[in-house]
Amino acid sequence: MTDTSVTQQVRFQTVEPDFAEQRIDNYLLAQLKGVPKSLVYRIVRKGEVRVNKKRVKPEYKLQAGDVVRIPPVRVAEANALPSAKLDRVQALQHQILYEDDVLMVINKPAGLAVHGGSGLQFGLIESLRALRPQAQHLELVHRLDRETSGCLLISKRRSALRNLHEQLRLKTMNKQYYALVRGHWQAHVKMVSAPLQKNTLKSGERVVRVDSDGKDAETRFRIIEQYNQATLVEASPITGRTHQIRVHALQAGHPIALDDKYGDEDFSRFMQGLGLQRLFLHAHLLQFTHPQSGQTMTVEAPLDDALRDALRRLGSKRFA
């Protein structure tokens, strides 16, 4: 196998104002493209990364003028991006819901990871960088699970990323998802509030559990349509924890269809019998304040044919 990586020398970088308030881990991930996320956290934890000659934690927020020591690491060569001519990459062009000079909203397909790693050669963000080589600062504003489809916000400028991250922090960004869950959701259950804790199994698989020692998490739920054995709900996460909607739906007693981590096998088999082959979780609406114009932006992503067909087979009137 040909080694396509190179070892960089120690670097000392002065943080420009445009990168102020960015977490050191996210800064390093952007600077060390091609380096596994696990390695980035390891070099921070071991103190090999220094800011102003001092050790820092991954959540440290950089300030303009900070001097960052980046140790020698093996990184993928610059040509690690996929070819923009690949059909899979080209197909993303047709999934762009909105785009301007500072941001983009894309309807992420199910089955596509938001970034490469864990054995994946490339993900959505690498594909978009190949499609938009002139956009030097394409970054994910937030994330979606690999099997979740729908609205995903991408920034094109550091200033826009900071602004949008602040909206997430202040909980002023509105994200709404459609989820098909087992059984009849009870109308009075409009909010699930349960702290969530991330755990890593011996296999390396990451799972999230409700745990009193976990981080606070809240999700609003609203019934969209009831069926004999299922309910289509709209889920609006107030916080942004990993697998939050999936675990909160389970906590309410209504796991999501075809959820391979937190689902119900019988319900998933029933839905597979109706032709569903993927997790029924779709980010259908995203509302935020445009970082440049101040305008309220509302972007919607239609359900794909696979999800609409499953609803029609259940007897949906809304999506008939």
Image (cartoon, rainbow, N blue to C red):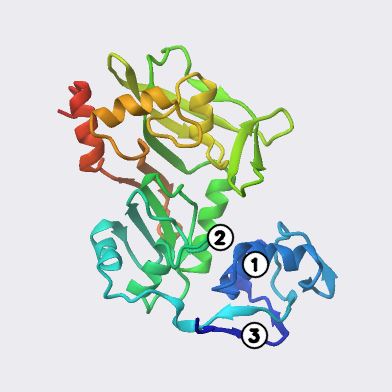
Residue type, numbered disc 2: Arg
Residue type, numbered disc 1: Ala
Classify mark 3: residues with Cα within 10 Å, few (<14), some (14-19) or many (20+): few
Classify mark 2: residues with Cα within 10 Å, few (<14), some (14-19) or many (20+): some
> In the image, residue 192 lies at what x, y percent?
54, 23
Marks 1,2: beta carbons within 8 A: yes
Q: Is residue 41 something that shows in the picture?
A: yes
Q: Nearer the viewer, mark 2 or mark 3?
A: 3
Q: Which residue is mark 1?
A: 20
> In the image, residue 253 lies at what x, y percent?
49, 18
The quadrant holding residue 132 is bottom left
The quadrant holding residue 35 is bottom right
Judged left or right of residue 116, residue 9 is right
> In the image, residue 139 lies at what x, y percent?
48, 64
Mark 2, secondary structure of its residue: helix
Judged left or right of residue 261, residue 231 is left
Relative to 85, is 286 above or below?
above
Residue type, numbered disc 3: Thr
Q: Which residue is mark 2?
A: 162
Q: Residue at x 67, y 79 (%)?
A: 73
**Mark found first going from the N terminus, 1 or 2:** 1
Q: Residue at x 84, y 75 (%)?
A: 53
Q: Nearer the viewer, mark 1 or mark 3?
A: 3
3D distance between C-alphas at marks 1 and 3 = 27 Å
**Mark found first going from the N terminus, 2 or 3:** 3
Mark 3, secondary structure of its residue: strand
Q: Which residue is mark 3?
A: 7
Classify mark 1: residues with Cα within 10 Å, few (<14), some (14-19) or many (20+): some
Mark 1, secondary structure of its residue: loop
**Mark found first going from the N terminus, 1 or 3:** 3
For the C terminus, which image quadrant? top left
Judged left or right of residue 10, residue 170 is left
